[in-house]
Amino acid sequence: MEQNEKRMVYRSAWRSFYGLFSLMLLVLILACACTIWGPFNEGAKLKWIWIIAIVVDIFIFLCIALKRMTMRLILKDDPDRPEHQEVEYIVCNPLKLFTEFKVSKEVGLAKIADIDVKQNFMQAILDLGDIAISSPGTSEKEINAKNIPNPKEVRDEIQKHARKYTMKSHSSPAPAAAAELPKE
């Protein structure tokens, strides 16, 4: 990486998986309830309930960690290299090994037309949000990054970098006026 290049990587926050963490807690609560009040007071059955609960919780946690590690929203800004002036969204889906395992979408900073931040009630409480980026001439959002922490700050940072390049493209020097042809 060169010194001039600015690269910022944003990932889903751990707190964005509140639903799955709640499911993990519910599995443990059910195992405790079966231990205390359930008809499974025998040692062998009780042991299997706890083994199943722990395996399910470990599986859920591994899904959370894998999903968080494989989702990245990257802001690249290298003034000297136009191919490194973009926003890139990379997401891997391990459940789609043979179809769409890794999806990568890019939008050049000069081509960003609109950046939307959407938050549901829980996202607003946890300061998370979905960032949707579109470019001119498209009706749909090209990049839709889910559960980004501090989404308004991320949007402002992307807009700040995008403004540099949109201003350059709009304020490029006009072509020199055509010289008059000498009259014969």
Image (cartoon, rainbow, N blue to C red):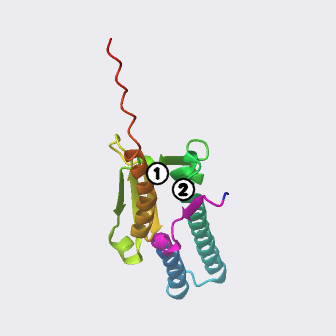
**Crowd tier of the residue under label 2, counting other residues whose Cα lies within 10 Å: few below 14, some 14–19, many 20 or above:** many
Asked whether 14 falls inside the magenta stretch, the response is yes
Question: Is there any visible trace of residue 169 in the rendered image?
Answer: yes
The residue wearing badge 2 is: 77
Disc 1 secondary structure class = helix
**For the view shown, which residue lies furthest in the bottom direction?**
36
Residue situated furthest front in the rendering: 184
Q: Nearer the viewer, residue 95 or 57?
A: 95
Residue at the spot x=34%, y=23% of the render?
A: 180
- Kind of residue at disc 2: Asp
Q: Is residue 119 above or below residue 87?
A: below
Q: Which mark is residue 3?
A: none
Stretch in magenta: 3-21
- Residue type for callout 1: Leu
Q: Residue at x 57, y 54 (%)?
A: 78
Q: Residue 150: x and y, percent?
A: 44, 71
Q: Position of residue 3 (x, y in %)?
A: 65, 61
The residue carrying mark 1 is 109
Nearer-N-terminus badge (1/2): 2
- Residue at image location 32% in from the left, 43% down from the top: 139
